[in-house]
């Protein structure tokens, strides 16, 4: 929940409240054995956090792997479009 921060005057003297918002990051878990490498999740990711691996899983499919974990914003677009339910996204609150 947002917390009210400091009050200050704007350029024209109006009173402005600043809100201290918690920063949310995402953590992506991929079940690589179930992934079929369709890459729908790769296309859906707005921050390009995941990509197809050059390796294959036990079924011979290239699978998705996280390539930029710090860039994840926790939107879960990847998990929403995954037809096989291979992706889970956890949201974590970052301390400032």
Image: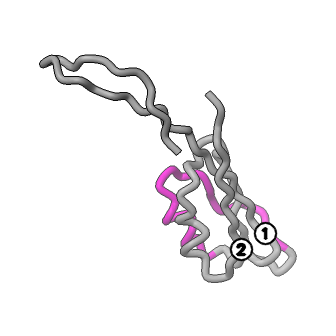
Residue 90, position in %: x, y? 68, 57
Does the stretch in magenta take in 81? Answer: no
In the image, residue 26 above or below residue 61: above
Asked whether the beta carbons under mark 1 and mark 2 sit within 8 Å of each other, the answer is yes
- Front residue of 19 and 38: 19
Residue 9, position in %: x, y? 24, 17
- Residue under label 1, please give it: 32
| Residue range (magenta) | 38-57
Residue at 72% over, 68% down? 63
Tell me where residue 65 sits by quadrant. Answer: bottom right
Q: Residues within 10 Å of mark 2 (few under 14, many from 20)?
A: some
Residues under labels 1 and 2: Cα distance? 7 Å
Q: Earlier in the sequence, mark 1 or mark 2?
A: 1
* 8 sits to left or right of 58: left
Tell me the element at label 1.
Answer: loop
In the image, residue 24 above or below residue 9: below
- Residue under label 2, please give it: 86
- Front residue of 96 and 18: 18
Residue 23, position in %: x, y? 56, 39
Tell me the element at label 2.
Answer: loop
Q: Residues within 10 Å of mark 1 (few under 14, many from 20)?
A: some
* 30 sits to left or right of 75: right
Tell me where residue 12 sits by quadrant. Answer: top left
Does the stretch in magenta take in 39? Answer: yes
* 45 sits to left or right of 10: right
Residue 28, position in %: x, y? 69, 57
Which of labels 1 and 2 is toward the front? 2
Residue at 18% over, 23% down? 14
Residue most extreme to the left: 12
Residue at 61% over, 27% down? 96
Residue most extreme to the right: 58
């Amino acid at each position: 929940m947002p917390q009210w921060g400091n009050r200050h005057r704007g350029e024209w003297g109006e009173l402005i409240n600043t809100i201290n918002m918690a920063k949310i990051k995402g953590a992506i878990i991929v079940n690589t054995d179930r992934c079929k490498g369709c890459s729908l999740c790769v296309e859906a990711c707005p921050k390009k956090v995941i990509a197809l691996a050059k390796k294959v899983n036990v079924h011979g499919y290239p699978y998705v792997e996280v390539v930029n974990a710090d860039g994840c914003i926790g939107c879960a677009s990847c998990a929403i479009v995954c037809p096989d339910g291979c992706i889970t996204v956890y949201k974590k609150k970052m301390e400032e």
